[in-house]
Image (cartoon, rainbow, N blue to C red):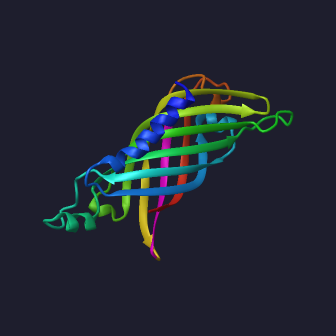
Amino acid sequence: MSKRWLIWIVVAAAAAPRASLGAQASFAIAAGFSGARGDLGNAVNAGYHLLASSATDAGVYLPSGPDRAQRSNAGSLFRVRADAAFTEFRYKVPSGIRNAKARVLSGTANALVSPAQFGGGYLIGGIGLYRMSAECDGCTTATTKGGLNGGVGYELRFTGLKLFAEARYHYIAGPSDPTTGGVKSSTQFVPISLGVIF
């Protein structure tokens, strides 16, 4: 699948929550540390990521009152969220190779579950497309595959801001992914994010 198709899928996924009639939408941006696992972890150093997301209520609320206003004050038990993320790692390579990087551009569709007893905590999981590339001065190779993700997060209101912290595990199955440095294994990484919800 071409890079152009991936971009269209990310844009469509991000727009989907706003199309839900009567739903309460929110938007978020985040950044943070990304740790690589498995063969990818052997090939690269720790990296960073940037995240943008759009979420909406899924229509199931905690039972706190008879009308929508009271229910929405309690928060949504189930939500859906679309994410677009960029992740970059630096390869552990000999000094003769310059600017060697592994990059992952992803678009994911996710479900969030917020049990009442968790307070501001939530569980998140979903599926998506991942464009993985290995780059250096004068060289580039890339592939696009489907993958899974899951993790936990916590939302907190602080001095007028709504903040969140989140840790997720991403798994892209299949051999010969360029990000693994040529090792025939899956691509796995764990981004830890800090962000703001609008």
> Magenta region, mostly helix, strand or loop?
strand
- Residues 137 and 154: in front is 137
Q: Is residue 106 above or below residue 29?
A: above
Position of 85 with respect to 19 (left or right) is right
Q: What residue is at 68 percent from the left and 29 percent from the top?
A: 181
Position of 72 with respect to 55 (left or right) is left
Q: What residue is at 63 percent from the left and 27 percent from the top?
A: 142
Write down the region rendered in magenta: 160-172
- Residues 8 and 106: in front is 8
- The residue at the far bottom in this view is 159
Residue 80 pos. (x, y %) = 34, 48
From this viewpoint, is residue 172 visible? Answer: no
Position of 187 with respect to 54 (left or right) is right
Residue 89 pos. (x, y %) = 67, 42
Quarter holding the C terminus is bottom left
Q: Is residue 67 above or below residue 51?
A: below
- The residue at the far left in this view is 66
- Residues 173 and 23: in front is 23
Residue 56 is covered by the magenta coloring: no
Position of 74 with respect to 177 (left or right) is left
From this viewpoint, is residue 197 visible? Answer: yes
Residue 91 pos. (x, y %) = 72, 38
